[in-house]
Image (cartoon, rainbow, N blue to C red):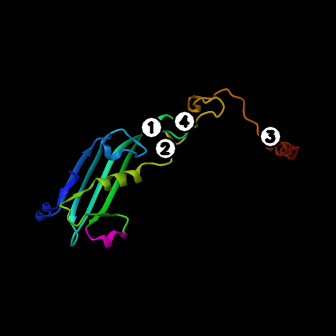
Amino acid sequence: MLLVDLREFARGPVETRAELAGDDPLFEGLGAALAGPVRVTGRLQAAGEARFYWRGSLDTIVATECRRCLRAVSVAVKAEIHALFTKDHDALEDPDSYPLAREATEIDLRPAVREELLLAVPQWGVLCRDDCRGLCPRCGRDLNAGPCGCASAVDHRWQELAAFKGKLRE
């Protein structure tokens, strides 16, 4: 339930709980493939005149690739959500604020879920393991499976330094 009717606040804070499918249109253009549903829980409460504060959390699994060897990797993503929904448009200077139309009768929490998920997804890739050796830049073989057999690359810019190092040892 991520669409809350404002009349529900007559009974006090509203508990929110939802499970959104990974292929929900809300997540289109996210830049990450969701490997499972997005589970959202939280509590929405009135926080003054025409202001509503939502504190929640989300968790899901993102399918991505290791940035070194390109193996498939699943990453658990969790995020805390702190959002203020308000009809007072002067309060929108806060980046965690979401506008409500003055005649609004319900609060849609989904934009806050999308934004927090977008911020929580790893942007620069992940590693399949800390000691991932990656791919050979010449033949493309996965170096985690063992050496590839390619000759060591010699950087000719360092040859004079290597020769000097040999003279120092003598």
Looking at the rendered structure, the kind of residue marked 1 is Val
Cα gap from disc 1 to disc 4, whole angstroms: 10 Å
Check residue 164 for magenta coloring: no
**Quick one: label 1 or label 2, which is nearer the N terminus?**
1
**Quick one: label 3 or label 1, which is nearer the N terminus?**
1
Disc 4 designates what residue?
Answer: 69
**Mark 1 near mark 2, Cβ–Cβ under 8 Å?**
yes
Cα gap from disc 3 to disc 1, whole angstroms: 37 Å
Residue 68 image-quadrant placement? top right
Q: Position of residue 141 (x, y in %)?
A: 60, 29
Which is the main secondary structure of the residues drawn in magenta?
helix
Looking at the rendered structure, the kind of residue marked 3 is His
Which disc is residue 73 wearing? 1
Looking at the rendered structure, the kind of residue marked 2 is Val
Cα gap from disc 2 to disc 3, whole angstroms: 33 Å
Check residue 90 for magenta coloring: yes
**Mark 3 near mark 1, Cβ–Cβ under 8 Å?**
no
**Mark 2 near mark 3, Cβ–Cβ under 8 Å?**
no
Disc 3 designates what residue?
Answer: 156
Q: Position of residue 60 (x, y in %)?
A: 34, 45
Identity of the residue drawn at 23% across and 48% down: 18
User: Pointer 2: residues within 10 angstroms few (<14), some, or many (20+)?
Assistant: some
Looking at the rendered structure, the kind of residue marked 4 is Cys
Disc 2 designates what residue?
Answer: 126
- Looking at the rendered structure, the number of numbered marks drawn on it comes to 4
